[in-house]
Image: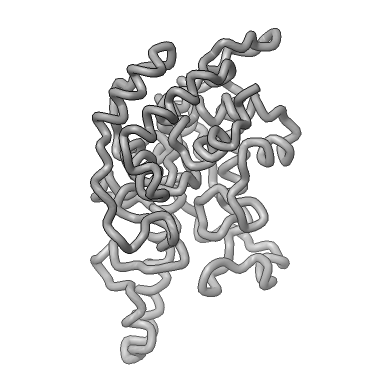
Amino acid sequence: MDKSNQGHDARSYPRGIESGTPIAPDALSPRNRGVRGLMKRPAFQFYPGDWLNDAGLRLCSLPARGLWLEMMCFMHQATPYGHLLIAGRVPNPAELAKVLGERDISVTEWIEELERNEVFSRSTDGVIYSRRMVQDEKNRKQWAKRQRNHRNPNDNSQRDNGVTDGNSHANVTAESHLSSSSSSSSTSCTTSSPKGEVSSASPSPCPHEQIIELYHKHLPELPEVAKWTPTRRGYLQARWREDKRHQTLEWWERFFTFVHKSDYLCGRVKPQPGRRRFIANLAWIITQENFVKILEKNYHD
């Protein structure tokens, strides 16, 4: 469940940017400016106490925690802020591994570990984002808007752009095509969807329980679904809606039968020395990138 500001990464991520932080000379260049001309911060504060006391993060291995720190650095440089984008696009695990100089299988395992402990969230199209960073950026823009209105009380030119005092849901930015968290909603990842993810025509409702039953029936060797969180509901709903062919239980039955044929996904591949055996679960299977790779037979011999 995405706990927004009260979730794991809400405690582990540094709380904002100190106003007195010196600005590097090149921070004023166009390449270091963010959405709507807001200047990107050259650094962010880090609170060791928050990092060490985060329960979900402590359940992760040291390599997984190191990966999360690297991911936050990329998120700090990304637009929209707080989303895992490299060079303006979503990296798959193989690309992230290449950038970090790690093996694809290792990065995939660490990402799964972080996700299992709810360190981060995903938008409905599978983009990883930090709940705290997204909320911090939203608060920063609202603060900047209030400052402008305070300095220019008679200037109405910027009062109708979707940001109003006291309404944290009114800010419409370039992040609108991606889900983000808010302090009052734990289902944000299911209420916002990227362009192209959901068609204008209303498909039949996604039968979550029936699909989960099919997963358990055809993949008994994979981990049982113990909790169906709003984030996971968002993944499955997106996969159901994105293609008309996916909107039947018969299709999902064939899909899970196909997954069962993969030795890698079902944990039948002997791991390399010092590595844990990988085994997929339903939440991993239905994220967009993994889902597409399964359909492309990347995990089948």
Q: Residue at x 42, y 41 (%)?
A: 121
Where is residue 296 shown, x and y percent of the image? 59, 37
Using the rendered view, name the quadrant where residue 77 is placed. Answer: bottom right
**138 or 87, nearer to the observer:** 87
Where is residue 167 shown, x and y percent of the image? 25, 65
Q: Is residue 202 above or below residue 269?
A: below
Q: Farthest residue to the bottom: give it.
A: 154
Q: Residue at x 40, y 60 (%)?
A: 138
Using the rendered view, name the quadrant where residue 136 is placed. Answer: bottom left
Using the rendered view, name the quadrant where residue 216 is placed. Answer: top left
For this view, does 218 lie left or right of residue 66?
Answer: left
Q: Is residue 91 above or below residue 199?
A: above
Answer whether residue 31 is visible to the viewer in this image.
yes
Q: Residue at x 54, y 31 (%)?
A: 111
For this view, does 170 lie left or right of residue 63?
Answer: left
**242 or 5, nearer to the observer:** 242
Count of picture labels: 0
Answer whether residue 117 is visible to the viewer in this image.
no
Which colouring convention does the figure follow?
Answer: one colour
Where is residue 218 shown, x and y percent of the image? 38, 18
Where is residue 227 shown, x and y percent of the image? 29, 25
Q: Is residue 212 above or below residue 89?
A: above
Quadrant location of the N terminus? top left
Quadrant location of the C terminus? top right
Q: Residue at x 51, y 16 (%)?
A: 266
